[in-house]
Every structure is written in C-alpha cells, then in structure tokens.
Amino acid sequence: MTIPGRNDVPKEPPRVLIFDNDRKVIMELKECIKAEGYHVVCVEQTNELFEYVIDDQIDVLVLAVETWDSKGYCSVSAHVGHIG
C-alpha cells in the first residue's frame, strides 16, 4: 500500500481487529478483509480486545454484537468504526 503523492512511500496496511465469539464468523470476515489488503487480527475474548484497544494496536475495530429481543430472538449486527 502506498501514500499517493508521497513518492510512493510504502505504508503499512491498516490494522483491523475483528471481535466475535463465533469462530466461523471471524474466519469468514478475516478472509474477506484480508483479500482487500488489510492486516487482520481476530480475538474472541474481551480481555484480548481491550489489550489491543488500550495499546493502540489497531486502526479499525469490527464488533459483532448479539442481542436478544423480548421474544427470545437473536440478531447480530456488525459495527465498523475508526479508532483514534
């Protein structure tokens, strides 16, 4: 990856952290995001997530959050945001 207009100086690819407790979801997202040229880290434990966020080791955080409605149905939504 290069920075346009800066003599094509190589730049590290953005670091993406995927957090979910479903390993299948993590692996599918990882493959899709890596194919676009990003560096991907996957975690399933909250303490690992906090370590990456606190140490400023990521640029983008992808969270999958499970929520249960009053009827017992589960929905999963992904939130993508820029850190910093």
Image (tube, rainbow, N blue to C red):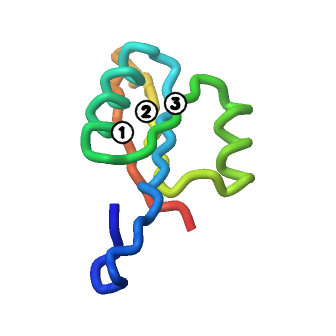
Report helix, strand or loop for mark 1.
strand
Q: Which of 40 and 53 is in front in this view?
A: 40
Q: In this view, does 46 lie to the left or right of 39?
A: right
Q: Mark 2 Cα within 10 Å, few/some/many (few <14, many 20+)?
A: some
Spot occupied by residue 62 in the image (x, y as percentages of width and height): 44, 42
Report helix, strand or loop for mark 3.
strand
Q: In this view, does 73 lie to the left or right of 48?
A: left
Mark 1–mark 3 distance (CA, rounded to whole Å): 14 Å
Mark 2–mark 1 distance (CA, rounded to whole Å): 5 Å
Residue shown at 40%/73% (left/top)?
9
In the rendered image of this protein, does residue 28 appear above or below residue 1?
Answer: above
Of the residues under marks 3 and 2, which one precedes in the sequence?
3
What is the number of the mark on residue 64? 2
Residue shown at 67%/45% (left/top)?
52
Spot occupied by residue 23 in the image (x, y as percentages of width and height): 45, 15
Residue shown at 73%/53% (left/top)?
55
